[in-house]
Image: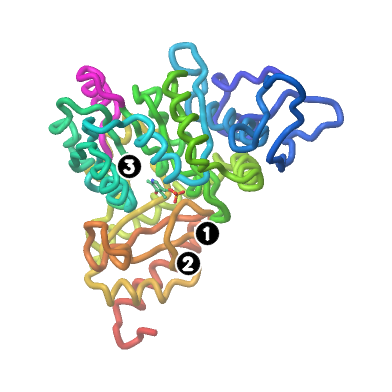
């Protein structure tokens, strides 16, 4: 069987087939990881694989898969290019540092991923002007004039605000700016930024895309061959390359992406609904909730709303009692895995969140078990004397 037409199939079909090579008799469906620093290379340099920092066949398979998921029909009739990296931050940095020069201005979200401020400091030291504005209300529009690059993160982590990608991309392009979207939280099954006008869709594959909490990986997708080449050159220069084993595990994990996302996202919605009914819980945010401030924009541009729910408990102590009383939910950072996790986000410092703010990542447990566990932990946390 060959010639799959990824653009015409449903998400589940594309997820299980994405990036598979054409059938070859007696070869495996998904070839195993290729461990190689160098490849046979007699005579002049030709062919794709010469040195392991530049290219690896295991990357190629995953890169094709990611491209098929991020833009199944291509963009403007052309297939998009995907490049895999050692981590989400390697991918984020690759776009920012390959596209920006001293004297350029860049617009970042003020409420984005917690490592963005570190990148911001470094960009400033290199002579790039960094402006920030919140994700909600498309506020980044107001500081766009004269910028070279607009960086969006939607939904934002951990606040779960959403901005209108199409509107911001049109405004940026009208001013000559490029647009990159951090697509980590949504995954390509939740939203396709390139189809909404973005020049780059960038993500951490560490989270829901691979979903088992057992590897770090990132990627950049880009519809323009020239810009993709400059990101590729950056990867070669800094060597932020993924190992073949992680790359292969990531590809293997993609097959269950639609199953995991459907279950986890449904669990997140059910959990958000249950939290709304609790008097001690405030500020519940989930873009899939009909009354969420982000819902209208999210519903226009997203096909799934993700597995992360955020909310607030009255105090640090209350939140810590809640986390300690959970039995099916690990107190751990990161999100997107098949096992539910939750954490009190303020323990890290840096995010502009209250002491009792919880970021909850819904896993693939049975919904009734998960909700029961959360409600029981809330009951326990509401009685300080019964704390652990
Ligand atoms: C986790 C995360 C990153 C960084 O990814 P790593 O794989 O941890 O390097 C970037 N953006 C967002 C939104 C994230 O959640």
Question: Is the image coloured rainbow, by chain, by secondary structure, or in one colour?
Answer: rainbow
> What residue sits right under mark 3 in the picture?
155
The residue located at (65%, 20%) in the rendering is 4
* Magenta-highlighted residues: 162-178
Q: Earlier in the sequence, mark 1 or mark 2?
A: 2
Image-based side of 383 in relation to 82, left or right: left
Q: Nearer the viewer, residue 165 or 107?
A: 107
- Position of residue 183 measured from the top left corner of the image (x, y, whole percent): 40, 38
Per the image, label 3 sits on a secondary structure element best described as loop
Using the image, determine if residue 11 lies above or below residue 251: above
Does residue 56 appear to the left or right of 165 in the view shown?
Answer: right
- Along the line of sight, which residue is nearer the eye, 14 or 74? 74
Q: Which mark is residue 339?
A: 1
Estimate the spatial distance between the alpha carbons at disc 3 and disc 2, rounded to whole Å. Answer: 23 Å
Relative image position of residue 248 (x, y in whole percent): 65, 42
Q: CA distance from mark 1 to mark 2?
A: 8 Å
The residue positioned 27% from the left and 63% from the top of the image is 349
User: Disc 2 designates what residue?
Assistant: 330
């Amino acid at each position: 069987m060959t010639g799959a037409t990824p653009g015409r199939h449903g998400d589940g079909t594309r997820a299980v087939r994405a990036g598979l090579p054409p059938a070859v008799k007696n070869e495996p469906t998904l070839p195993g990881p290729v461990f190689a620093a160098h490849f046979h290379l007699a005579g002049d340099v030709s062919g794709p694989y010469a040195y392991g920092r530049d290219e690896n066949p295991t990357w190629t398979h995953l890169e094709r898969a990611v491209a098929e998921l991020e833009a199944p029909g291509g963009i403007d009739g052309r297939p998009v290019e995907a490049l895999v990296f050692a981590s989400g931050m390697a991918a984020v940095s690759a776009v920012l540092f390959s596209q920006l020069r001293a004297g350029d201005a860049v617009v970042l979200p003020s409420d984005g991923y917690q490592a963005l401020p570190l990148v911001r400091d470094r960009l400033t030291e290199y002579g790039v002007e960094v402006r920030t504005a919140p994700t909600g209300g498309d506020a980044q529009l107001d500081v766009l004039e004269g910028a070279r690059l607009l960086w969006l993160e939607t939904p934002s982590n951990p606040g779960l605000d959403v901005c209108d990608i199409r509107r911001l991309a049109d405004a940026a392009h009208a001013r000559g700016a490029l647009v990159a979207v951090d697509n980590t939280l949504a995954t390509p099954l939740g939203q396709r930024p390139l189809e909404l006008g973005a020049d780059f869709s960038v993500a951490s594959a560490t989270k829901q895309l691979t979903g088992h909490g057992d590897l770090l990986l990132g990627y950049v997708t880009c519809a323009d061959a020239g810009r993709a080449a400059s990101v590729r050159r950056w990867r070669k220069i800094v060597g932020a390359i993924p190992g073949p084993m992680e790359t292969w595990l990531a590809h293997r994990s993609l097959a269950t992406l639609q199953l995991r996302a459907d279950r986890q996202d449904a669990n997140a919605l059910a959990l958000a609904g249950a939290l709304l009914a609790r008097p001690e819980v405030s500020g519940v945010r989930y873009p899939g909730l009909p009354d969420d401030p982000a819902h209208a924009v999210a519903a226009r541009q997203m096909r799934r709303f993700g597995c992360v729910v955020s909310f607030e408990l009255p105090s640090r102590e209350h939140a810590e009692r809640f986390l300690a009383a959970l039995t099916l939910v690990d107190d751990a950072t990161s999100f997107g895995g098949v096992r539910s996790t939750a954490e009190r986000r303020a323990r890290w410092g840096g995010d502009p969140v209250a002491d009792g703010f919880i970021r909850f990542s819904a896993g693939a447990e049975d919904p009734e078990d998960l909700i029961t566990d959360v409600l029981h932990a809330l009951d326990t946390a509401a009685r300080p004397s019964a704390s652990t």
